[in-house]
Image: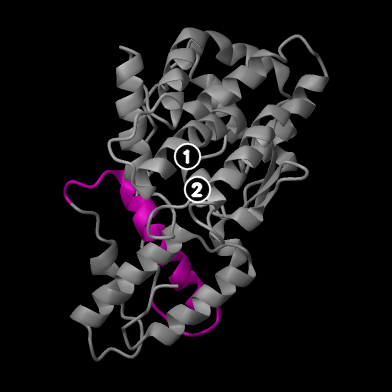
Amino acid sequence: MTELYSKIAPFFKSFISFRIASNRWNSHYERQLSLFDRYCATNYPEGKELLQEAVNSWCKQHESEKNNSCRARIKVIVSLVRFLRKRGLTGIEPPELPKMEKNTYIPHAFTREELERFFCKCDNLIPNRQTIEQRSRRLTIPVFFRLIHSSGIRTIEARMLKRKSIDLSTGVLDIRNSKGDSQHYVVLHASMLKLMCTYDRAIENIYPNREYFFPAKNGGYYSKEWVHTNFRQLWDAANDSHAVANDFRHHYAIDNINRWVDEGFEFTDKLYYLSKSMGHATIENTRYYYSLVPSMANLLKEKTEAGFNKLIPEVDDEDWC
């Protein structure tokens, strides 16, 4: 955990302990709370309690900030204020979250040929220098991108995947660092598990006793910029179309659903398992991927019962505080 500097840090630490105990603490919460702590230490150095002014000024939407970005940034502080209010530790009001904007980005629909060309580039990297970092990159990239393509996990989940969170005897991933806060499990395909085992042995020779399955040179995990830069370089070298690494997750969902459309009652069961494997809070989140394909949206709606989503309702942060 990053060091805290403000005089109200004890309140923050209580919040952190609660979130960790509830298995609802992640890197996004850590970063945003750390930034808010430094803001309070700099602008309210003598403040010994959380001030409405500090919360309001920190949570104010920036001129160039989109609604969804602002929501992600200040949701941490909203959760903090709710936590403190429920325990009588503050009387201030939590700020209102901006209205969520509909995502207008349409993920790329990969073709088999595009994927073959991309992974061919991944498998034939030529290191610029025979450094540890270059050797590690050559080993990591083919496995990292195959993992997110074949499992549907988020790029942040792959980046922050710890070695102890993978059972290489069964192929089960224990996903804890995620976009949300819920823990979920993913079972690897046999071919992917074999590749992960081979990689594990090879990378252990470079980074013995590592913490993260895909270790960066500083012993930590790779940044999102590392993912973006390497994907763009390799994709652009292999294909003329536009795509980003996160499109693999959409492709995984669509590819699975397409194979089930004629399976009747089993379709709903499989959609539920897919939703849990992808770490979605509700079936509706999984259906969203399919809604991005207009010609197929009605088919998916017909295959799922109207009330099925009520079986796994989303839990709001306020309910946990």
Q: Position of residue 304 (x, y in %)?
A: 71, 23
SS at circle 1: helix
Query: Where 230 falls versus 317 (above or below)?
Result: above
**Disc marking residue 140:** 1
**Disc marking residue 106:** none
Query: Where 136 falls versus 49 (above or below)?
Result: above
SS at circle 2: loop
The answer to which of 250 and 139 lies nearer the viewer is: 139
Q: Earlier in the sequence, mark 1 or mark 2?
A: 1
- Location of residue 126 by image quarter: top left
Tag 1 near tag 2, CB within 8 Å: yes
* Residue placed furthest toward the front: 130
Query: Where 100 falls versus 320 (above or below)?
Result: above
On the question of residue 307 being in view, the answer is no
Query: Which residue is located at x 60 percent, y 54 percent?
Result: 163
Separation of marks 1 and 2 at Cα, in angstroms: 7 Å
Q: Position of residue 255 (x, y in %)?
A: 60, 18
From the image, give the main secondary structure of the stretch colored magenta.
helix
Left or right relative to 262: residue 17? left
Q: Which residue is mark 2?
A: 214
The C terminus sits in image quarter: bottom right
User: Residue type at mark 2?
Assistant: Phe
User: Residue type at mark 1?
Assistant: Thr
Within 10 Å of the Cα at label 2, are there few (<14), some (14-19), or many (20+) other Cα atoms? many
